[in-house]
Image (cartoon, coloured by chain):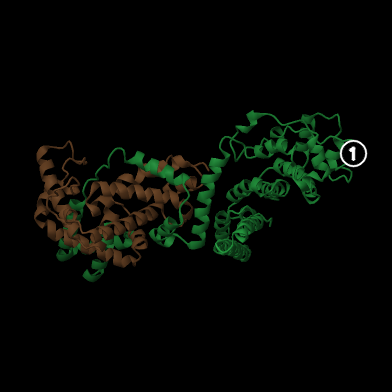
Chain colours: A green, B brown
Amino acid sequence: MDCEKFESAMIDELYSELDELTSAAAKRHLAGCARCSARMGGLRATQRVASLPLVEPPGDLEERIAQAADKAWMAPAPRPRVGQAISLAGSWAMRPQTAMAALFLVMIGTSLLFLRGKSARTPMAAEVTVTEQGTPAPAASTPGARVAESMPPMQPPSTFSSPAFEAKPAAQAFAVPPPRESPAPGAGFAAGPLPPMALRASPESPASAADQREEEVPEDQLFDSALRNYRAGRFIEAARQFDALPSSNPNAPDLWAARAIRDGKGCRAAVARFDKTALRDKQAPSGWDALLEGALCYRALGDFGSARARLNGLLGVDSHKDRARAELDRIDQLQQAQANREAAALAAAKAARAARPAQTPAAAAGAPAATASTQASQGAASASAGERP
Amino acid sequence: MSSLRSDPTDEELMVRFQRGDRPAFAVLVRRHKTRLYNFVLRQLRHGPSAEEIVQDTFVRVVQNAADFRHASRFSTWLYAIARNLCVDHARKRALRRHPSLDDPGPAPNGDAPERMDLSERTADAGANVERNVVSSQIRERVLEALHKLPDDQREVFLMRQVGSLSFKDIAEIVSVPENTVKSRMRYALEHLQAELSDFEEYARALR
């Protein structure tokens, strides 16, 4: 090794980043070259002197960091910060992934708040009681729902306290007695869509026995049964069965449960379930479907911001980006239409006010007309905002 | 995943944290806060600002946890964030043009530059008095010499000496070839050597 080669290897040797062979060659050169040896010695001494002892930060810094981190954990990352973080993290951040990541942080934060102290399954169970009074129209028309109405009310609050996500006390949480044979014989069960259960279920069977039998049913059959119920419009029953399946089941029962809740009880009840599925099944088709369908529900509820956030997250997913784009365009149209209506209503009100001073009787007629048209516009706006996907 | 090692790696802790294990994050903080604090302090020369940047760095780790790609080392990512915050801070400070912070002389206000704070706890605390006095003098000179370095040399020097990052990782952070990083390191050492030449002999005698 000559002086030139040593020059280029000097720093590596100083910081022990040379491989054994090259390091040995460097050392050999040093032993025989006074100039390089002096140079190396100078740098080594400088390195030693300049290696100042570490200063301890204030004792409370760790605590302050923990508190700031807690706040950051729970708070949604606002858009400007996400942009900042992208530039800060340099090549580590990629736009579509960042949008998705920021979205998941929001969903983690909001879902933790939403599901605290309750099992994720029990909102459905609790609402079974509620819907006995006011079952949504589609479900009410099905025999399954009628049978549900005949069931005794729900109970055990103790089940509600189990933590949200991993609780699978499916059979226990729904100590809902099996659909009894109602006076309308064979109502929802005539077609025999529930093979083992329907055959074995009898008016006299106790709740626990039927639940046990449901647990014994092979997962495939339970899923098929749930799907049949769903397609037949028996959404509550379908949701109950989907929830009885383990989340690990490859048919994405959580996603189907969310769909069944959406179709049986509406979007407001379903969005939390879609979000939960999206979080659990990240990077999986069922998760992306959950994001998409959750977004459509948010849009139906008029929450365009949440809808956009989810659809934006999907723009980076090959299988979903076209659909996401199309649905985002649809939101643009809806908001534009809404803005137009509001502008039109304002203009109408203005015109009415302008017409007022001319004639008093006309003014009296004009004002209510203006109000009526405003109300009609607002009604139209909210109606379209509430439209179902 | 069970491991025969008693201490999880940074990357293992990040995986756990990404899956919701918040105590894993606290371990990462404890592991890295001191070196990170020193890395920032040696550049900003202002304790409170350094504390703030360290805190902001870890907050960004939380906010962007899902972004962390495990092909990179955690420390590389961590120092990249801190480094960018330092650059932003320096830019803002230049815009404000605070003479008291840039002036190497004694600061009239309460925010004394860190080099004036001789009460900082160092590893030398407890050693004999003369050694402490000399150490303080050396320390002052080193900090002065560091301050005189060009920014790009100083940050490479600190990432290596304080952060213990490899030259390869440093190259990733500052987005230059590895050879450039090594050149900057050599220049930094040579500049420091020129500044500290009269201390060299004494320093060698102390070791």
Occupied quadrant, residue B128: top left
Q: Is residue A88 left or right of residue A196?
A: left
In the rendered image, residue A280, in percent from the top left (x then y), is placed at 59, 48
Q: Is residue B6 above or below residue A2?
A: above
In the rendered image, residue A84, in percent from the top left (x then y), is placed at 40, 58
Occupied quadrant, residue A125: top right
Q: Nearer the viewer, residue B10 or A149?
A: A149
* Residue under the point 56% across and 64% down: A358
Q: Is residue B166 left or right of residue A51?
A: right
Q: Nearer the viewer, residue A9 or A352?
A: A352
On the question of residue A107 being in view, the answer is yes
In the rendered image, residue A38, in percent from the top left (x then y), is placed at 15, 61
Q: Amino acid at mark 1?
A: Ala
In the rendered image, residue A335, in percent from the top left (x then y), is placed at 58, 62
Q: Is residue B71 left or right of residue A150?
A: left
* Residue under the point 60% across and 32% down: A161
Instruction: Say which residue label 1 marks.
Output: A184
The chain holding disc 1 is A
Q: For numbered disc 1, what is the local secondary structure?
A: loop
Q: Nearer the viewer, residue B34 or A53?
A: B34
Q: Nearer the viewer, residue B53 or A83?
A: A83
Occupied quadrant, residue B5: top left
